Image (cartoon, rainbow, N blue to C red):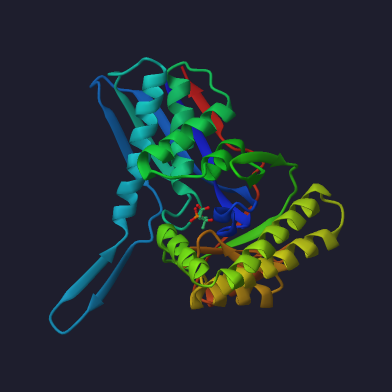
Amino acid sequence: MKVLASAPAKIILFGEHSVVYGKPAIAAAINLRTYVRAEFNNSGRIKIEAKDIKTPGLIVSFSENEIYFESDYGKAAEVLSYVRQAIELVRDEADANGRGITVSITSQIPVGAGLGSSAAVAVSTIGAVSKLLGLELSNEEIARLGHRVELLVQGVSSGIDPTVSALGGFIHYENGKFEHLPFVNLPVVVGYTGSSGSTKELVAMVRDTYEDIPDIIEPILAAMGKVVEKARETLLLGEDGRWKLGRLGELMNINHGLLDALGVSTKKLSELVYAARTAGALGAKITGAGGGGCMYALAPEKQSEVATAITIAGGTPMVTEISREGLRIEVVVP
Ligand code: PMV
């Protein structure tokens, strides 16, 4: 028997960083997916084949007599620990320890860009392997197992990434509670700077500033919380009318300015954000922790212009939409 499952990447639409201080956030699944094929093998071992996962690649620099290589392949190895934990957890649940399983992964999601590649790989692995072992799990249960995988691999996690990846659509998150918001079609362009920031270091940096000057930082975080609530109200109104998209764009720009005030933007991120706005995006902001990673733009009827502008500004554009679907079982071959 063989099973092919897939799960999407996510972007944080509003509320990164302020969410760490108990404010709400909104995230959504996007149409970039990780595919995992699972089948039994006779060795009794777990075998993982990662043939095509997107890593930022290689940078080479030269001095007089030396060549220096920098690579992000360590990040690819990190992804594999999520796969391994996911398989072990599902084998445990199914009382199938010792059963040999091979999984093959291909992915459209760049690793280490803040787009939730680890959660997508964990969720699609859990989906494929649980089906292979005959477990009937709901997507909610798979989201919870995905959260457990994150806790095992990285120690702390809010669980928002595996929740969005398993359930799809829009998720409003506040103090550990998730609410599924109704689906609206948002034409977005994600712009990847090509480098990644460390979420842990950026969260610590904001914490230092907060402790140093709380009277200045607290109102910024409070404003971010209000931006998220206004965005939730706007999304709840549904899809009828351009001005509502305009309002979302406006809120994105405000949220970006507030993130910049916290110090998590970079020159490259700001360049991609302004290039997207100049090319006609209704709004553009950082998505995720910042310090590198990605921005996203809301660009109805302007996706290709915005993608070109992002390329000219030195980023890698990914034209995409919000994914209604989360985890999907693609094929089951008996
Ligand atoms: O790096 P990402 O995309 O997973 O985003 C991190 C979001 C933060 O709010 C900065 C941190 C967190 O734990 O919520």
Above-or-below relation of 98 to 89: above
Q: Residue at x 59, y 59 (%)?
A: 18
Q: Position of residue 319 (x, y in %)?
A: 60, 59
Q: So how many labels did they put on this image?
A: 0
Which residue ends up furthest to the left in the rendered image? 65
Above-or-below relation of 321 to 162: below
Horizontal placement of 197 versus 230: left or right?
left
Horizontal placement of 116 versus 95: left or right?
right
Horizontal placement of 318 versus 322: left or right?
left
Q: Position of residue 220 (x, y in %)?
A: 63, 68
Q: Residue at x 47, y 45 (%)?
A: 157
Above-or-below relation of 25 to 7: below
Q: Position of residue 173 (x, y in %)?
A: 63, 45
Q: Quadrant of residue 295?
A: bottom right
Residue 50 seen anywhere in this rendered image of the structure: no
Q: Quadrant of residue 230?
A: bottom right
Q: Residue at x 74, y 68 (%)?
A: 250
Location of the N terminus by quadrant is top left
Q: Residue at x 53, y 39 (%)?
A: 7
Residue 60 seen anywhere in this rendered image of the structure: yes
Which residue ends up furthest to the bottom in the rendered image? 64
Q: Viewer-proximal residue, 107 or 220?
A: 220
Q: Position of residue 28 (x, y in %)?
A: 63, 48
Above-or-below relation of 130 to 252: above
